[in-house]
Image: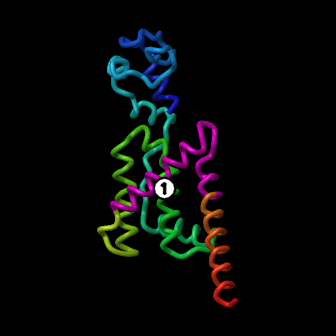
Amino acid sequence: MDLVRSWKRHVECPTCKATAERACRTAGGRPTNEHRARRDAAGPIPYAKWRKEGLIPEQRTYTIPAVLKESEKARVDFNVDTALADGVAVVRMFLAERLGLFLQGEEAMDRIDDAVRKLIEVRGPVGTADMVTVLAYQVASLLAASAGPNGDPEALFDTVIRAQVDMARKMQKIQRERAEG
């Protein structure tokens, strides 16, 4: 993300007149995302060059064995059923692909979507693949936002899943005790 931000900032902004290497400013003088005119003036982002230089990772390919392995790991780690473990595996794919989603957008989404479709084909109806993909993307986005700029979304995700599983188990225990009492 820093590469993209610095690339966009290597030229002066025609809209707000921010100098090179400085953030664009709102009319009130506060820093903001780069204006469209500045992004256009910066030109195309050199992803291929950065990939050759090793500045961004190679594209990932998700295979069914890898996704199933991640799902099994989640099932064991959190002691949950297969459906929840599959959801955890998909969210972890999004978290692992954060940079790819930011840099490559549609290409990264297509790779993840294909992996989710394969997972759903193995586990259940094909029609649910799009919904799983959208929901996992939303969860990953919220985690990244909640973790903040210096936070670890993966650690936050593990904490949230553990807390939810613990709470569900406590509620089940309370309901069992009420039924017995």
Q: Compared with residue 145, is residue 42 higher up or lower down, i.e. above or below?
A: above
Query: Which residue is at the far bottom?
Result: 180
Residue drawn at x 48%, y 56% as measured from the top left: 93
In-front residue for pair 170/57: 170
Magenta span: 130-159
Q: In the image, residue 124 lies at what x, y percent?
A: 37, 75
Q: Secondary structure at mark 1?
A: helix
Asked if residue 113 is positioned above or below residue 56 in the image, the reply reads below
Residue at the image position 69 percent from the left and 84 percent from the top: 177
Amino acid type, label 1? Met
Q: Quadrant of the C terminus?
A: bottom right
* Side of 165 relative to 33 (left or right): right
Q: How is the image coloured?
A: rainbow
How far from the left and from the top, in percent, is residue 134? Answer: 38, 55
User: In which quadrant of the rendered view does residue 74 lie?
Assistant: bottom right
Q: Position of residue 67 (x, y in %)?
A: 47, 65
Q: Quick check: is 65 in the magenta stretch? A: no
> In x, y percent, where is residue 119?
40, 68
Residue at the image position 68 percent from the left and 90 percent from the top: 180
The residue at which mark 1 appears reads as 93
Residue 147 belongs to magenta span = yes
Q: In this image, 128 relative to 142: left or right?
A: left
- Does 35 appear above or below 102? above
The rendered magenta stretch, by its main secondary structure, is classed as: helix
Q: Residue at x 39, y 47 (%)?
A: 108
